[in-house]
Image (cartoon, rainbow, N blue to C red):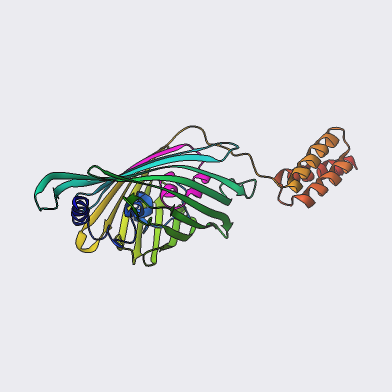
Amino acid sequence: MIRLLMLLMLSAAVPAAVQAGAGRTSLDFLKINASPRSLAMGETGAGLADDAMSAMYLNPAGIARLRHPEASFSYNLWYEGISLQHFSYAHPTRTMGSFGFSGTVLQVKKFDGYDNSGARVGEVAATDFVVKPVYARRLFGPSEDQRHGLFLGAAAKFAREELDEFRANAVMADAGLLYVRGLGSGVLGFGGSAMSVGRGPAFGAERDKPATTYQAGLSYGLHLFGDPFVVAADVKMPVYDEFSYAAGLEYGVKRILFIRGGFVSHQSLGDGWRVGLGIKAKFLQLDYAVSEYGKMGLGHLMGVSFRFGEPIEVTPHRTPAQDKALLLIRRAKQMAKETRFYEAALSLNEALTLDPNNKEALQLLRETRDALERQR
């Protein structure tokens, strides 16, 4: 009975937006967006996810697109004294994909607790947190551009709810796919993710359902007036809540100042407009987003990201045909050194049949034809 009273008091301390779907799901803090960039773009990014923090929240496949190790931290000052801190780190490697880790803590201001007779028993503390390791890699794509192709990512998730002396744990998983390719003068991205899939925490004999959410998104980026411009749209499908639709955009002035805006609708955590700014230096980025939650007021999210080290050049993924084309190119180079230009041209033509977009073969074929002309 005491525990029930404490839970009721916690429900009063946490706004209705967080407790939407009460009795149906737990760990709803996992739905709170911890990425200032994504939040400012209307909480979109399942089809973009090209920074560590957005990927951790929206689509784990996104960390496979990173070219620098990246560490990020954000602080979310919500309404009614609720705060959320998030840390993420992603480390791409040359041949083994990308590894990451993130941790998130939700804290609620202490509130009064009462026993079953109604007597005050002091202040009650409530904290939720989650930690997760992440792995992602590129499955295939063009060898000349490692940021394009099909990417796959997955994460294990350990979460805990703490209410005074009571503890409840949950083990879940995230998974995502992301496909990126050039289209026209820009880049198209499409992605989908399943977040917080598994078993919810158990208080005593009863186990709650996790706040599982499926999400799909599109993005398109290009250069507008010489500066990067991105538009994105997402649909979120919570298992125990209604669909949510979102759209957002980002414009980078001189690649230094990034202006963002967006809108999300039909979301239990609060729908409405989101806006924000980002300032990017060489390896440092500062981000800020503000969200309106109707009568609840405004939420403020601040973040900082660091990129360090040399860019990681991932070993290109090659098909058997591309491997054979490379052998033919090496053979043609040796033939050219021996002035056997006609045979070298035949070898290069065969290589281009196997790999039509091989720039090295095209260049060598031009040089070989020039050499044949000089021989005549």
Q: Residue furthest right?
A: 376
Residues 263 and 86: in front is 86
Q: Residue furthest left?
A: 119
Question: Which range is magenta?
Answer: 52-75
The spot of residue 85 in percent (x, y) is 30, 43
Residues 303 and 207: in front is 207
Residues 139 and 292: in front is 139
Residue at the image position 37 percent from the left and 57 percent from the top: 209
Residues 263 and 366: in front is 263
Q: Is residue 70 magenta?
A: yes
Q: Is residue 331 magenta?
A: no
90 over 33 or under it: above or below: above
Position of the C terminus by quadrant? top right
Residue at the image position 86 percent from the left and 43 percent from the top: 372
**Residue 18 quadrant:** bottom left
Left or right of 108, for residue 339: right
The spot of residue 136 in percent (x, y) is 53, 45
79 over 245 or under it: above or below: above
The spot of residue 197 in percent (x, y) is 44, 54
Left or right of 295, for residue 35: right
Decide if residue 95 is in sight here: yes
